[in-house]
Image (cartoon, rainbow, N blue to C red):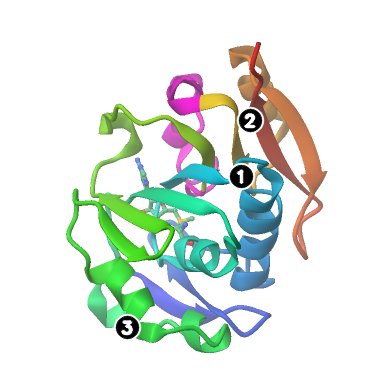
Amino acid sequence: MKKELIITKDGSHSLFVPELNENYHSVHGAIEEALHVFIKNGIHSHPKQNINILEIGFGTGLNTLLTLENKKEVTVNYTALEPYPVSEKIYSKLNFFTMRNLDGETFLKLHTSDWEKEIEISGGFTFFKSEKRLQNFTTKKKFDIIYFDAFSPETQAEMWTEEVFKKCFNLLNKDGFLVTYCAKGVVKRTLKSIGYEVETLDGPTGKREMTRANKKGS
Ligand SMILES: C[S@@+](CC[C@H](N)C(=O)[O-])C[C@H]1O[C@@H](n2cnc3c(N)ncnc32)[C@H](O)[C@@H]1O
């Protein structure tokens, strides 16, 4: 699948996929969107100090980098799925770490690290990358947060099904949640039918709403 580097409105890069006619991030700002959806309404909204995160899918590595930057005192065990990795030619050009004044070597390590092998990126941050599709991914781990960052329902309908969200529900710890940029009614209804408690939150710049779906403990 061909991918083209683009610049979004906050100056950060994203990728455009001509075959899907879709971007990896909001054109209003890739970094701005990721900080709002996955950091503010993701890791910063979970009370635990030791958090297991599952990202679907890893793509450019932006969400991982921003989680590493913004995890504060929280210990993070991060699992990322990516069946269609971004090539070196592209990830080596991404401007995320320069825009955030972060260490480029750490960012590159996220991309160059071995698949299916857990590594320590820095104190309090372990990283495991799997080249499997979510549909084929199995693990004994349970997660506190799922960053659900698939392509949109219009582009990749098979990711927004009852079957996929049930799988996510079973992968979550009690009081864990799934967070996504998408706020489509049909998606929220599917999530509710499975047993998630669904919150509609303000969206990032350029998008009215987003969704957080909670697995409540009982
Ligand atoms: C909208 S992009 C977002 C990527 C990433 N979070 C980022 O910030 O760059 C969606 C990603 O999901 C990946 N993907 C596609 N099908 C998948 C599947 N079945 N399981 C897991 N990830 C998948 C794509 O390859 C792509 O990298």
Question: Mark 1 near mark 3, Cβ–Cβ under 8 Å?
Answer: no
- In the picture of the structure, the residue carrying the numbered disc 2 is 187
* For marks 1 and 3 on the same chain, the one whose residue lies earlier in the sequence: 3
Residue in the image at 29% along x and 40% along y: 133
Q: Secondary structure at mark 3?
A: loop
Neighbour tally class for label 2: few under 14, some 14-19, many 20 plus, Cα within 10 Å = some
- Residue type at mark 1: give it: Thr
Query: What is the x, y in percent for residue 57?
Result: 40, 50
Q: Is residue 141 visible?
A: yes
Question: 18 and 116: which one is in front?
Answer: 116
Which label lies toward us, 2 or 1?
1
Distance between the alpha carbons at the discs numbered 1 and 3 = 26 Å
Please state the extent of the stretch shown in magenta in the rendering: 149-172
Residue 190, placed above or below residue 42:
above
Residue 92 - label: 3
For the C terminus, the image quarter is: top right
- Of residue 6 and residue 96, the one placed in the foreground of this image is 96
Q: Secondary structure at mark 2?
A: helix
Quadrant of image for the N terminus: bottom left
Q: Is mark 3 within 8 Å of ligand 1?
A: no
Residue drawn at (30%, 27%), measured in percent from left and top?
A: 140
